[in-house]
Structures are given as structure tokens and as C-alpha cells.
Image (cartoon, rainbow, N blue to C red):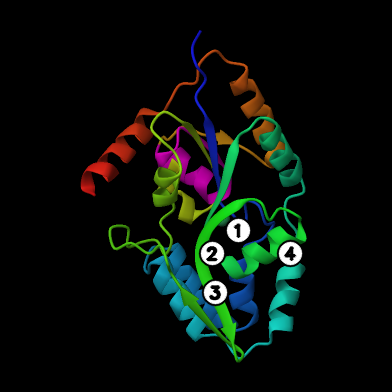
Amino acid sequence: MTLKPTIKIFIDFDGTISSKDVGREIFLNFGNKEIAFNILNDFQNGLISSKNCWEKLIENTYLISEQDLNKIIDDIPIDSSFHRFVDFCSREFIDIFIISDGFDFYIKRILKRENLEQIKFFSNVLRLKDGKLSAEFPYFNPDYPRFSNPKMIHIMDNSSDDDFTIYIGDGNSDTESAQYCDLIFAKDELLKFCEKNRISFYSYKNFDDIQKIIMKLLSRKRLRKSHRAYLKRKFAYEAE
Ligand SMILES: [Mg+2]
């Protein structure tokens, strides 16, 4: 009898759990729209890092009230299949983590609204004081300068080489970190990146699709780990 490895799932927040990119909505709503668009485009095209992008967007925001900020956040729904997925993972004793290049301010608020506060998350920090937004990047690491919150660090900190790791994401902030996991579920930008770079993945529309595939995996005798993820992790450890 082979012992089944522990499965750990790492999930992006904006556009993956939330139906829209909440950070993007906030900065497009509370700043000069044209400037905000240009900053977001520069980031999309790889001209600026995500930390730089957030800093410039914050600089571009007007004075805002907490009420207005909360209103924007409260109007953004999450993917309704996520609730079923969380229940499924808890029945199967699968640990899930949210890793986000966005901000705690809205992740915390949305998880609370959805009664999902028990889920652990790692993100940047956004504060509102006297109408001014400010950000902190507690996980910024100069070894990964492209990211304000290098997600691979949380993947490595919260899983061992013996675990079977799964990544779920949709965007540019997921392309590098997803490769540290054994299995990737991708849509949108992440899907395009995986296709272009010949990285194997499952495409998904919602969390029900993901649950079906994971159920199939659970019925298998053994899970094949990713050699790419093994190498990524190995090099990261050696670089430390
Ligand atoms: Mg995303």
C-alpha cells in the first residue's frame, strides 16, 4: 500500500475567487482613470513591477471615505462555486491557502461577508487613514523583484517536498508561482501563459470543474509530482 501524499491547494484571489479584480476596481474608481489605466497597462506589459504599480496607483488616488471604499468592495461578488469547493476541501482534509498580490483590506472584508474567515491568506497590506490610502508589502523580497508579494515563498513555506501541491489562478501574478506546484488549474492570462510555454495545466471555468478533477485524482493509486516544480523549489532552496 502506498501512502497518499497530503494535498495542499494555493489559490489566487482577484479574478479567481472574486469575480472581478478588486484592487483594479478600487484604483480605477478613486483616481484619475486615464492615469490608472496607463499604470495598469505598464504593469501588464512588464514595464513596471507589481510593487511599483501599486505605489503609483496609490499616488494617483483622491481622498476617499471608508464608506465609499467599502461600497465598491461589497458590490463585487465571489464565484459562487467557491463555497462548495471550500466544503469539499474541508471534507477531504485538504488545506487551502489564498495567496494574493492584492490587499488584505478587501480580502478580509469579502471573506468575512462570505463566512469564509477561516481560510488563511497572505497578501499585501492596504490602509486608509484620514482619507488617504497607503500600502505595505510585508513579504516583498528583493530576490523576486517583479512581485510585491512573491507567492512562491508562501507555497514553499506551507508545503513540503512530499506534499502534492495544486495551484489555482487566472493572471499574470500567477505565472511564475504556479510553476512551483505539481498541478495547475488555469484560466485567462495564466492559461495563455501555460499554453505558450508548454506548461501542462487543466483549464477551468469555475471551482466545480476543479472539484471534479481533484475527485478523480483522489481515486488514483498515486499522484505524479511535477518535475518542473521539484526543480523550481530545489533552486529556490539552494539560492537561500
Ligand atoms: Mg488574479
Within the magenta stretch, is there residue 195?
A: yes
Q: Residue at x 62, y 28 (%)?
A: 214
Determine contact: label 4, label 3, CB under 8 Å: no
For the residues marked 2 and 1, what is the alpha-carbon distance in whole angstroms? 7 Å
Query: Which numbered disc flags the more N-terminal residue, 4 or 1?
Result: 1
For the residues marked 4 and 2, what is the alpha-carbon distance in whole angstroms? 15 Å
User: Which contiguous range is marked in magenta?
Assistant: 179-197
Q: Nearer the viewer, residue 152 or 87?
A: 87
Give the residue at mark 1: 14
User: Looking at this rendering, what residue extends furthest in the top direction?
Assistant: 1
Q: Which mark is residue 102?
A: 2
Q: Residue at x 48, y 50 (%)?
A: 174
Q: Residues within 10 Å of mark 3 (few under 14, many from 20)?
A: some
Give the residue at mark 4: 76
Query: Which numbered disc flags the more N-terminal residue, 4 or 3?
Result: 4
Q: Which mark is residue 126?
A: 3
Q: Which element carries disc 3, helix, strand or loop?
A: strand
Three-letter residue code for mark 1:
Asp
Q: Which element carries disc 4, helix, strand or loop?
A: loop
Three-letter residue code for mark 3:
Leu
> Does the residue tagged 1 have its C-beta within 8 Å of any atom of ligand 1?
yes
The answer to whether 210 appears left or right of 2 in the picture is: right
Q: Residues within 10 Å of mark 1 (few under 14, many from 20)?
A: many
| Quadrant of the rendered image containing residue 143 | bottom left
For the residues marked 4 and 3, what is the alpha-carbon distance in whole angstroms? 18 Å
> Does the residue tagged 3 have its C-beta within 8 Å of any atom of ligand 1?
no
For the residues marked 3 and 1, what is the alpha-carbon distance in whole angstroms? 15 Å
